[in-house]
Image: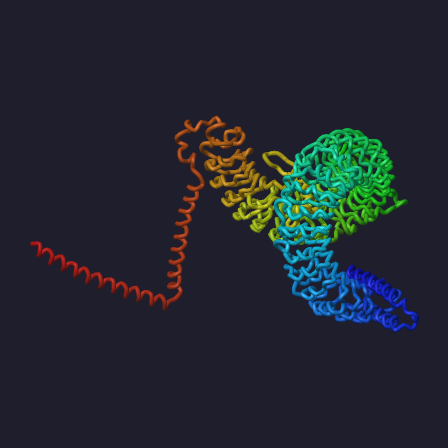
Amino acid sequence: MGIGYQNVAACAVLVLVMVMAEIAGICANSSTLLHSPCLERERQALVKFKASLTDPFNMLSSWHAGFGGRIPSNLGNLTNLHFLDLSDNEFSRDSNINWISQLPLLEHLNMMGSFIYNEFQVNIINLTITAPNLQFLNLAANGLSVSNLDALQNMTSLVHLDLGWNNLTSVSSWFGNFKKLEYLDLSGCGLHGPIPNAFQNATSIEFLDLSKNSFDSLPSWFHKFEKLKHLFLSSNNFQGTIPVALQNITSIEFLELSRNSFTSVPSWFIELKKLVNLNLSINKLTSMECSISSILKNMCHLKTLNIGGNKLRKEFIGNSDLSTCIRHDLENLDLSENEFNDHLPSWLGQLENLGNLDLQDNFFYGPIPSSFGKLLKLKILYLSNNKLEGELPDFMGQLVNLQVVDLSNNSFNGTITQNLEQLVNLQYFDVSNNYLTGSIPSSLGQLINLTSLDLSNNYLKGIIPTSLNQLVNLSWLDLSRNKLDGRICIDFQKLVNLFNLDLSSNNLYGTITVEESHPFIISKMSYLNLSYNQISGSLPEHIGHIMPNLWSLILGNNLINGSIPKSLCQVDDLRILDLSKNRLSGKIPNCWKDNKLWEEINLSSNKLSGAVPSSFGNLSSLFWLHLNNNSLHGEFLASMRNLSQLLIMDLGENQLSGTIPSWSANTFSSLQILRLRQNRLSGSIPLQICELSSIKILDLSRNNLNGPIPWCIGNLRGMNLEAPALSPPSLVAESPIAEGWKTEDVIEVMKGREFHYTKILILVVMMDLSENNLVGSIPKGITLLNGLHSLNLSNNHLIGKIPNMIGNMRSLESFDVSSNQLSGTIPSSMSALTLLSHLNLSHNDFSGPIPTDNQFSTYDSSSYAGNPYLCGSPLPNKCGYLPEDHGSSEFEDEDSNLDKLEKWLFYFVIAIGFATGFWGVIGTLWFKKTWRHVYFRWVEDLADTIYVTTAIRMAKLKKWMMMRSRVVV
């Protein structure tokens, strides 16, 4: 809102200045100026206008009134007004603008972005009657529809009409009435299809902006615009070849066709010889019937040519000279982001007025041509991300107008040229990611206008020259990933504008110290990276006060000792703190506060002790937490529940105790790496861990966990092939957080070896539950985790057999279940695990033949050691010579054990049921006398009934048999 009010006040001042100037011009002709009713009436109108304004920033302090939100109607008294600009204000919806119809002499009206809404339609009708001289009308960005504008059809005197960024969606036929119209802007109006026929009578147009719509073709009559000089068709839906309708518009000077889907440039294009600015960037150009050099040879007045962001190859560059032009006006040439795979064109040296040359992101190779030394007016040179090689040319020091030089990401070698001190205008110099050797020239210290210097990722050696401390305008200095040595000699008291300092991955030494008697503030420092050096000593206790605007402090992999300064808790904008792999000791300060910006805390591999500070729970925005490889103790803190954004939690190699809390699943719903390896955790693995739907690395190894592996372990969807690669949720690839994954470091055991995963961490999916006291069988659901690369269940007390469906885990590269009590045969489905390069089934009770298909022929005997009943290669036991008395017991698996168990359980349940029923009846009869009498009477009656029934049936049977015997006789 503050910015909005500033805009309103600024626009109000502009309106007042213009209106007062107009009044002065009109009323000054009166011979009785001091008594003119014109002056008095219009003075009162301005006073009332001023009284209607709100000035929260005191921009109109010389006046004594307030601001309102409505357009004052008193402006209607300015009957001689010719020019009125009310653009970019925030007037309220109920503003009364009827007074506009009282300005009969109005010629220029600008209400862009003033939110005039539907009421303006009525006043436009009045304007058509009362302001017949209106020539300039700007209604852009007001949310108008085409129905609001029908009254415009009578404004035939209009010369300039801007309706851009409204919701027109279509064009009315009355647009053809504007035969005097020279300027028409309909950009961003939601128009689509072919260019409307309504335009064809407006043949006086010189400026036409139809960009940011959905037009897809030009009509054949488009050539009628013979006076057209500026045409903007960018960001539409044009496809194929550039329309032939443009061929005869030879008057055109500015042609903007970027951000479409054009694929080809026709041969007639070079006939547009008056072109001054041509933009074909960000299309799908794959061919040109006229080469780039032929375009330049025929368009001698061209000042800007932009063909960047296409798919052109070397054959479209051309190689002819440009001598047909007496002089070349070209100042800006952009061929970036194509597929040019050739030497840099030497004819570019003929473009003597070239000031901006952008050839980055191509496949150019070879050295920089010597002809480039003729480009004495060159200010900006982008050659990054190519395959250029050779030494940096000496003539570069002669291009004294250079301001920006970017040669990064190539294969340049040799040393940095020594004559750069002449480039006094140079502001940006980047030669990073090359093969440069030698030392850093001290002459760089003479480039006093330099604001950014990047020499990173080369092979530079020697010391950092002290002359760099003379670069008082320097804001970005990156010398990382070289072979620099010596003491760090950066003078922060001189480099007061330094924003980014990266000296990481060198062999520099020194301490981070500030004399207590001469304190200073490095107020602009935001990024400081001195990691992977030999920095020693302790951190200044007041480092957080010295660099109050720091957002990233990276000092990992050094020799820093002492404790972590509490002043770091007071840095309001701190996002990344990396003090890992040093010699820090003592307790972690318990003073951390949430700034809603925290991304990472890495204190791993130090000598820190004590408990995890509860104030870490305040850092609700934290993504990465690395506290591994210290001597921290205590239990999981309830305050950790607040870290709901965590993606990595690494607390491994400490002395943490207690159990894994059941609330962890609900809290860490985004967690992708959980590493609690080598602690003193006990208890069972909670079932809730199965709810970690994003988890990709789960390492609970080397603890005292007991109980079974959760039966629901197959619910870890993050370990399925369908799951996306490791990445922060809802973050684009270009974001700083996404970039942060490339530097994360996690130590894991895979294939029996310890690995440091960094750049490929986003690809790793693994589970390690080894070296615990887990019991029971391997859950069959674990085979649903078909994205797992490594599964380690070794050194537990697991029983049963390997699930038969293990063959579904097609991504498995390492499988270790050694040192358990597993039995049964090796499932034949394991032959389908063609990526499995590490297998360890040793020291179990497996039996039967070893599969021989696919990768099984590559494992040695150590994979099966300690399984006496296994046979076949590579073991010495031959399956055909096994003792017969081993018989079925040799191949017995857990199914038979389960059958026996089920039989005993059946008999046991029957016995329990009988006992319960028997004693339920007998007990009742024993204690209830009346029930007992009733029961026995019922038994006697039942016995009598049975006896009588039986006797009768027997008598009948006997009688029937006697009758049958008589018949037989």
Give left or right: position of 111 versus 910.
right
Give left or right: position of 302 versus 59.
left
| Image position of 756 with respect to 136: above or below | above
| Image position of 508 with respect to 132: above or below | above
Percent position (x, y) of residue 631? 70, 42
Image quadrant occupied by the N terminus: bottom right
Q: Out of 944 and 276, give the one closest to the viewer.
A: 276
Give left or right: position of 502 versus 467.
left
Q: Out of 442 and 40, give the one closest to the viewer.
A: 40
Q: Residue at x 75, y 35 (%)?
A: 322
Image quadrant occupied by the C terminus: bottom left
Percent position (x, y) of residue 651? 66, 44
Q: Out of 696 and 193, give the one closest to the viewer.
A: 193
**Picture quadrant where residue 479 is located:** top right
Q: Residue at x 67, y 59 (%)?
A: 176
**Picture quadrant where residue 335 is located:** top right
Residue 813 shows up from this direction: yes
| Image position of 211 with respect to 114: above or below | above
Percent position (x, y) of residue 824? 46, 37
